[in-house]
Amino acid sequence: MSEFNRIAVKNLRTAFILSALDPDLYCPWLEIRFQTDDFEKLCLCARIDLKNDPQLDRDYLLTPTEVAALCKAFGIEFEHCSREAFLRKHTGHGDDIPYLIHTGYELALMIQGRKPYAFIEFDSVNALSVTRKARFDSYVARGVLRSHEEIFDAGRQPGRRIGRTLYAVAGEEWRIHASEFIRQNINSKGDGFENMERLQGALLGYERWQNDWWIDHLAKSGLLPYGAPLICKIDRAQHDWLAHAGFRALPPFVASTFTLYSPGSLDDQTMKRAIEEDPRIEAFVQFNVGLRHIMHAADFQTAGPYEIPTSLIPTINRNLVRTVRVLIQRPSLPDFLGSSV
């Protein structure tokens, strides 16, 4: 079984990633980053039509011949062993995830016994999709995996079939049935969506801390049904009110307005420093709300901060899509600071 090796070159301005593929598991086997601004030369080596993708934002599957030509043209030292390879622009998306996720490694993780369950999307007109499914299905034929297909005709495009296939390691078939039951019966909005993500993550084989990280990542990014993530500061009385309310509503504010911040404008150090400098601040909290409910109150296309009328708090509380999270709180004083006799 191939080990997943990575060769990294830091401090690149315009970078691409070349990923040699494991011929059996069809996942990255060896990767290298390289830099170039000569798109025409790159496209000539990889036989890419630059007119159809002028920014080279797509992923490309290269033949061993094309990989060799690319390495020779740009002086890339890459022991690809005459393997097919993916070529993609390096965007940094996903680089901060602190654990190995399924995407791109589904089959390898299952065959290596590291994950019991996975699913892949399918499109019959996409050669790469067809090849990936064939790799999975070869293990189904050997009895190593079990599968359940949800593939349908694409309607207006005769002959095209799209959908997904669910795969489980033999003996773990119950995960397929459980996944479908969850998807069909749980509310997919707000906290319901969070519960669904956690259950789905557990079925896929992720640990609790990994699910916690992923849920927070989705919420901070404002993805899917989590609405816009916003941050505000509260005092001690407001924190106590928030805790008493089960963190399911923002507390009242005395002033006529209160300040909201976007997650991108505040990091942990900035919030900690603010708490140290202002004794009135007990904590910074994050809440998630559909932006359409408050977008008239400020220009949310700017980086903020935003001054919002406190009269909007009831509207926010009616439309929260996640419990309020305490991001940073003032450290508690020790019970005993010292004693004298």
Image (cartoon, rainbow, N blue to C red):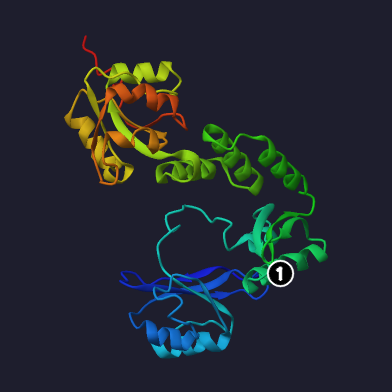
Q: Is residue 127 visible?
A: yes
Look at 70% across and 61% down and name the residue there: 111
Task: Report helix, strand or loop for mark 1.
Answer: helix
Indicate left or right for 147 with 195 as reference: right
| Quarter of the rendering occupied by the N terminus | bottom right
Name above or below for residue 162 compared with residue 314. Answer: below
Look at 41% across and 90% down and name the residue there: 73
Q: Amino acid at mark 1?
A: Arg
Residue 296 placed where, x, y %? 30, 35
Question: How busy is the neighbourhood of tag 1: few (under 14 within 10 Å), some, or many (20 plus)?
Answer: some
Name above or below for residue 57 compared with residue 67. Answer: above
Q: Which residue is mark 1?
A: 135
Name above or below for residue 60 compared with residue 152. Answer: below
Look at 50% across and 86% down and name the residue there: 47
Q: Nearer the viewer, residue 61 or 272?
A: 61
Indicate left or right for 92 with 332 as reference: right
Residue 207 placed where, x, y %? 58, 44
Q: Nearer the viewer, residue 126 or 261?
A: 126
Q: Residue furthest left?
A: 277
Q: Is residue 335 visible?
A: no
Indicate left or right for 263 with 119 as reference: left
Name above or below for residue 339 compared with residue 91. Answer: above
